[in-house]
Amino acid sequence: AAAALPEVAAGAGGKRRVSKRGQQKKGKVVAEVQVAAEVKSAPPLELRKTKKKNGKAAAGADGSALARPPATAGNAAAAAGKAKLPLSGKVNTFVPTDGPFTYNPDPDDHCETDVRAYRHIKPLLQQIEKAIYGKNAGELRLWDPYYCNGGTVKNLANLGFPKVHNRNEDFYAVLASGKLPPHDVLITSPPYSEDHIEKCMRHAAFSGKPWCILLPNWVNRKDYFQELLKTAPSLIGVAPQYLGPIGKSYHYWFPEGAEQRPDHVGTDGKTTPFSSSWHIHLPGSIGGMRLLKNLEAQQRSIGEWVIAKTVKGLKWSARKGEERQFAGQAKAAARASRLTSAGAAAGLQGERVGRGHGAGWKNGRRRFPGASGGDDEDE
């Protein structure tokens, strides 16, 4: 290092004597030269990576401490790397069936949509598929960017939609990469914590794609939602519609095996944190208004859900639908009661007639003279 010192000084200012000030900084310069010498003598980066990789492989082969640990709840958060924790500060311990999360979710967000909600949206998805592909043959490509435990894929496949992209990946990292999976429809129920709903809505509003997003009914009152209605070109042209259930609200399922269970989740894993509805957007490019009119015509024949232009109108339509259901049930019960009463009366009348005239009578008439005995024998 001392021999290299004049070269450093010369490199900085040509051949000259080292000044007193330079002599005072000699220790610092020597240290810098030593570091440079160490870097210069170090092996190439590729060689270091190879050695590191080989070392890990050897450690894994002989079972040393460097071997990768199995995926368990204890190391689920560590497997997510250095991704930031959610704002709640809670460290997730739940491990999905296909391995640890590739990001750090809030453990309170673990919920999967019940199949009833998907069943209600099935007629709409069938119409979209027919508008795009000309038939219903399981070709519609769906993307749910928020992963829980794989229930989305199973439920939609059982309803006739096998092409579903719902994987253990960070939605926001996918957006940042610009490599979105090929899809025809965005269908999801985003986590309720932090600003996930707002981020999801902002992406959907400017995506140019049809979307069906299951959200709490209070979302439409949020400032960002009202802003999107006025600024997103696709929503200005075709406003969102709302589809919800008649009767009980949609519920969700906390995944089996998740131990960090919020208070609102029942012992069976079922929860309904808020009343929710499908927020739907159908672009004009696929005949949005026509599809919505077809859907409106279907709602009465199916009788399980209603569709409206506002959440307020949705609630009103749901109440009316429930009233129709009750009226129909009461009418059916009254009809069944009348039929039962009429049957009982007919049976009682037949029994009385049979007892009163004996075996020689049928349907109130004597079968032959003298059959009943007594005075009939004299006729």
Image (tube, grey):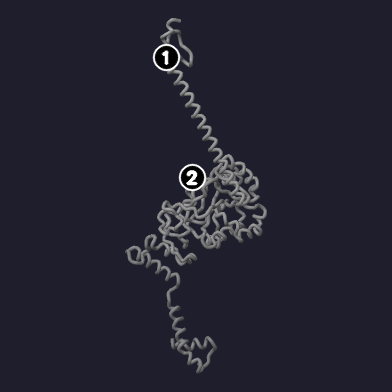
Relative depth, front residue between 108 and 133: 108
Residue 358 shown left or right of residue 330 in the figure: left
Helix, strand or loop under label 1: helix
Residue 237 shown left or right of residue 116 in the figure: right
Mark seen at residue 31: none
Identity of the residue drawn at 66% across and 59% down: 231
Q: Residue furthest bottom?
A: 20
C-alpha distance separating marks 2 and 1: 62 Å
Identity of the residue drawn at 53% across and 34% down: 334
Residue that label 1 marks: 359
Residue that label 2 marks: 158
Residue 289 shown left or right of residue 55 in the figure: right
Percent x, y of residue 237: 67, 53
Instruction: Choose mark 2 or mark 1, whichever is in front.
Output: 1
Residue 375 seen in render: yes
Disc 1 marks which amino acid?
Ala
CB under 8 Å between discs 2 and 1: no
Q: Earlier in the sequence, mark 2 or mark 1?
A: 2
Helix, strand or loop under label 2: helix
Q: Residue furthest front?
A: 375
Percent x, y of residue 148: 47, 55
Q: Quadrant of the C terminus?
A: top left
Crowd tier of the residue under label 2, counting other residues whose Cα lies within 10 Å: few below 14, some 14–19, many 20 or above = few
Disc 2 marks which amino acid?
Asn
